[in-house]
Amino acid sequence: MVARALSPFLHVILTLYKYYFMGGKGMDRQTQAPRGKSVPASLPHPGRRTKYQRIMLTMVCSLLALIFLALRLLPSSPLNPEGHPVITSIKPEDYPPAWQQVDIQPDSEREAEDAEIELVFTGDLLLHVPILNQGIAEDGSADFSWLFKHTQDILQGADLAFGNMEGTLTDGPYFGYPTFSAPKVFAKNLKDAGFDYLTTVNNHAMDSGIAGVKSTVEALRSQGLDCVGTRSHPDDPDFLVLDCQGIKLALSSFSYETPRVNGLRSLNGAPIPLNQENLLDTFSVQPGPLENLEADAQKLRDRVQAMRAENPDLLIFFMHWGQEYHKQADQWQEYYAQVLANEGVDLVIGGHPHVVQPLVSIPANNDAGQMICYYSLGNFISNQQPDTGNSEGRAEEGAMARVLVAKSSGRTQIKLADYIPLYMYKTYPGYPLANCTYGWALPVERALADPAKYEAEALIPRLKQALASSESVMGQKILLPSWDRATIHSTP
């Protein structure tokens, strides 16, 4: 404020200095004749100043300049939104009445508006028969908490953890492949392990019929776990909008369909009743009429627009797609991924192939100019074997996606897209039935670093193989450079 007030004063000093000391060279002042003509002797001329006058003027200008510099170097007073200095005294009488309505926050509170969150995503959760046999006791009670023995610290340490509940939760009877039905207590085990949200639409969502779709949603919600992709009632929202430390996320989930049955959409060959289609989010893939493909691409576009209307900071899609046991994305995964990227989606998490697939960045119409896509995270819980689907051991491997999201000055960006390679460790204790599996997902790098802690001393060669296999397929983590706050804009 003081510096601005003295600016005109400094201008006067410089003008006087140029006029009286420099002799007014190059200037047509009122005391000078027009250029090319002589100046009458009766008029003062700057070039005729005495030595004494020059010295005095120089001293005055120098003193004033020093005063100006001293004031300029003093700490400037903070300003409120109206441009007035902020009064730091706590006495109410020091504040003019007009300022009492101004909310002046300390710096620490303003900085709290910035946030960084960690999101963790797992692959498919499949309770095959040997896992059911191990988890269900002779008295009918059930517990599957041991499945998360070495991953629950990762899940609980994240700000939000998501998983793909592949199958249904019912009151029985219970089955594994090909029609999955597990005890509802599994919802509690998921909650205790650290999961926050589940995606529930996949090719096994109809394994227990529409009743199973509804009971799965209700079992999860009874434990405080919301889900996306399926609904128990037509009035339930189609997608989730949630806030995590001031970062607003919008999430949708879709699954590929199996060939239609008598014109009805189907999952795993189970037709979805026409009046219940709105309980599940699905899309078409070939073989089938091309018009179905385009109609469902438009369905995804419409969903993105509906989500964008909620003004989220990040748009996330879970996609159940691809070919089982194929380590590369197929043409329909790439087709739908590009549809989502064109609509400005920020992050895609894929599942279904039961093996990991590449982590890629796709050019997109969003603020970052790219969409992060995990084509497949493989399995998180399963009893699949090294030779399942001729996968050469890859069905025993999976990954957890780890995504860091930062928000600063109202702008949001994915900072890091990383993954944690996993190995599905299994033993066969034979209790209570011969066909039992007792095991869990092992975070490979941690287990290699501390084999004793993760009970992996005998697994080191296999863990090294799993690590190399996963990295060769998924590639490197994606570390995004810091965004330019002048050019990156918040999601509309």
Image (cartoon, grey):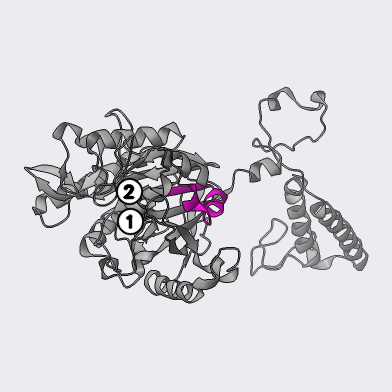
Q: Which residue is mark 2?
A: 166
Q: Is residue 146 above or below residue 323?
A: above
Q: Is residue 491 visible?
A: no
Question: Percent from the top left, x then y, of residue 442?
Answer: 49, 62
* Amino acid found under the numbered disc labelled 2: Glu
Q: Of all residues shown, which one is farthest toward the left?
A: 262
Q: Which residues are magenta?
A: 145-162
Question: Percent from the top left, x then y, of residue 61?
Answer: 85, 59
Q: Which mark is residue 351?
A: 1
**Residue contact between numbered discs 1 and 2, judged by CB atoms under 8 Å:** yes
Q: Of all residues shown, which one is farthest toward the right?
A: 52
The image quadrant where one finds the N terminus is top right
**Observer-nearest of 114 and 131:** 131
Number of dots carrying numbers: 2
Q: Secondary structure at mark 2?
A: loop
Question: Percent from the top left, x then y, of residue 332?
Answer: 21, 60
In magenta segment, residue 147:
yes
Which marked residue is nearer to the observer: mark 1 or mark 2? Answer: 2
In magenta segment, residue 420:
no
Left or right, 323 with reference to 490: left
Left or right, 411 with reference to 2: left
**Observer-nearest of 418 and 368:** 418
Left or right, 185 with reference to 32: left
**Observer-nearest of 90 and 322:** 322
Q: Is residue 400 above or below residue 180?
A: below
